[in-house]
Image (tube, rainbow, N blue to C red):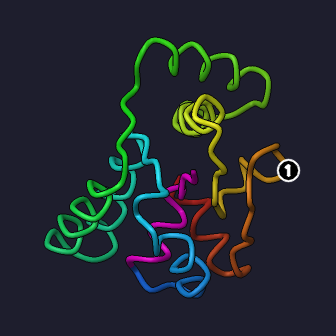
Amino acid sequence: MKIVDSTGWVEYFARGPLFDEYREHVADLTDLLTPTIVLYEVFKRVLQRLDRNSALKAAALLGETKLVELDRSVAIAAAEASIEHKLPMADAIIYATARLNEATIITSNKHFEGLPGVLFIPLPQQEERAEQTSS
């Protein structure tokens, strides 16, 4: 199983420079888990960058993956991951969801770089600066 993080989905929906790389990872929706916090982040960013119709289409596609809600076990694991890896709340929830479900995170979010169970795809320098200011 895989979790494509918000940065990957936004690259995919906005047809960013890493579109082709992320397209490979989202090809099989049955192999994807989506924490509901990722649904929130993707809808928000696509709405900001594109339009409401595109954001609704993105939400519908993410709805075809296995959505994972924040429950007690994920919340506790996320708090521990946040402290251990110095992750912001949303990233800690995503990381904990991946660990509890034995999933690999596919991302360009620098907060995840170097963590076990993460496939990190670096953003081009210009996009990286824009991503860091939008977080």
Amino acid under disc 1: Gly
78 in relation to 52, above or below = above
Residue at the spot 16% in from the left edge and 68% down from the top edge: 52
Residue underneath mark 1: 114
Secondary structure mostly seen in magenta is helix
Residue at the spot 54% in from the left edge and 67% down from the top edge: 8
Q: Nearer the viewer, residue 17 or 64?
A: 64
Per the image, label 1 sits on a secondary structure element best described as loop
Residue 133 is situated, as x and y percent measured from the top left of the image, at: 57, 60
53 in relation to 70, above or below = below
Residue at the spot 39% in from the left edge and 36% down from the top edge: 68
Q: Nearer the viewer, residue 128 or 118?
A: 118
Residue at the spot 52% in from the left edge and 21% down from the top edge: 74
Residue 49 is situated, as x and y percent measured from the top left of the image, at: 34, 73
Residue 12 highlighted magenta (yes or no): yes
Outermost right residue: 114
Q: Nearer the viewer, residue 4 or 1?
A: 1
User: What is the count of numbered marks?
Assistant: 1
| Neighbours of disc 1 within 10 Å: few (<14), some (14-19), many (20+) | few
48 in relation to 103, above or below = below
Q: Nearer the viewer, residue 99 or 11?
A: 99
Report whether 119 appears left or right of 39. right
Identify the magenta region.
1-13
Q: Quadrant of residue 119?
A: bottom right
Q: Quadrant of residue 93?
A: top right
Report whether 48 appears left or right of 115. left
13 in relation to 78, above or below = below
Report whether 10 appears left or right of 80. left
Residue 109 is situated, as x and y percent measured from the top left of the image, at: 65, 57
Residue 125 highlighted magenta (yes or no): no
